[in-house]
Image (cartoon, rainbow, N blue to C red):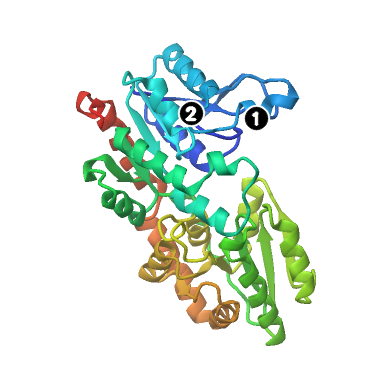
Amino acid sequence: MTRVLYVWDAEYPWDVRTEKVCLALAEHGHSAVITARNVRGLPRREVRPEGTVERLPSFPRWGRRLLSFPAFFNPLWLAHIRRLARAHAVDVIMVRDLPLAPAALLASGGRWPVMLDMAENYPAMIADLWSEGRTGRFDILVRNPRLVSAVERFTLRRVAHTLTVVEESSERLLGLGVPAERVSVVSNTPARARISALAPRNPGEPLRIVYLGLMESHRGIAEVLVAAQALAKAGVSFHLDLVGDGREYEHFRAYADQLGLTSEAVTFHGRLPHEAAIRVVARAHVGLVPHHATEAWNTTIPNKLFDYMAAGLAVVSSDAVPAARVTSDTGAGLVFRGGDGKHLAEVIQRYLDLSFWESCRRAGQEAIQSHYNWELDTERLLEAVSMVHSPRGRVQG
């Protein structure tokens, strides 16, 4: 049995990848302790099926956000991680993404091997925030692109192993000099049990289109709304569901009004619990992955692509490399020119052909069954954890 301390830099519950990783460990004879922030003032300890949650102390309300901020070298996090590693006699520390990776490394002091669960290209994501002017007053210190890139280099040289979510991310790390044997792809896939029974779509039924995710410019939401306007002008019978929130949520609601899109054509659901969001996805016909082809989106892949495929939706992806590759190679859908809302509308209209739509959604489900599923990714996760836990896996640097 391997005892893993999973370091998550936000509130828990809930996060889908944290739950999936830790539950997979628990279901295969290992154990996980999840450490998380505690801005909401929740109990310090909570026992859940995926593991024991050990939250940071609940400070006075005025200091909760500031003191527990997941800065690279926050001494509070460093001490908390070290205390939990000792108290739970862990074998491996696994840290999610870059913000707390240096703290995990310093806390380990070489005593425990550290794995990095790299769900995204953090330096590129931060660069996107800066390019869109969505930084805060302290970001020049803790989310400066140059600093973040330097911290990533520091981290990658010292962690025992890195989990990425897609091949393009692994290739980026190899280009940075990380040895191939210290990188594994554990993607954001659903379990095979999430494959839904296919419901028919009747001729003349409105085409239901869904977007699931944050409302941010670099995720292509403006182009989705432009496409909806173009579909309405073309007389296409459709309904667009937008599920998620974010810093620009109200901006996009106002933009929809500006484009003349009515509530009969577009529904902004805001943030929904995961299962409720999946129910909205399940009644749709077409799922959108409209992300701009920035470096960030060219080196990661969103959960929603696989959720759409498992639910039996035909997919429309932008030309962001990983999502476009999976969409095209599996036959699950079509690719449009990222940033071009009118082209997105043209591509969506291909699914007015019922037989073509049917072929795409069946191909997507077949790909989940055969290749893009959590059962296969769990095997790679367990293999990586076992390798790191072995004496050879403890050699770092």
Q: Position of residue 91 (x, y in %)?
A: 34, 21
**Which residue occupies 30% across, 37% down?**
157
Q: Position of residue 216 (x, y in %)?
A: 62, 58
Indicate the quadrant where residue 243 lies. Answer: bottom right
Q: Position of residue 192 (x, y in %)?
A: 43, 51
Per the image, label 2 sits on a secondary structure element best described as loop
Residue at numbered disc 1: 66
The answer to whether residue 261 is visible is no
**Is 367 left, or right, of 129 in this rendering?**
left
Label pair 2/1, CB-CB below 8 angstroms: no
- Residue nearer the viewer, 85 or 209: 85
Q: Position of residue 208 (x, y in %)?
A: 65, 70
- Residue nearer the viewer, 50 or 338: 338
Mark 2 Cα-neighbour bin, 10 Å: few <14, some 14–19, many ≥20: some
**Is 373 left, or right, of 206 in this rendering?**
left
Per the image, label 1 sits on a secondary structure element best described as helix
Q: CA distance from mark 2 to mark 1?
A: 14 Å
Three-letter code, disc 2? Phe
**Is 348 left, or right, of 147 in this rendering?**
right
Three-letter code, disc 1? Leu
Indicate the quadrant where residue 159 lies. Answer: top left
**Which residue occupies 43% across, 55% down?**
300
**Which residue occupies 58% across, 35% down?**
10
For the N terminus, the image quarter is top left
For the C terminus, the image quarter is top left
Which mark is first along the chain, 1 or 2?
Answer: 1
Q: Is residue 259 above or below residue 307?
A: below
Residue at numbered disc 2: 73
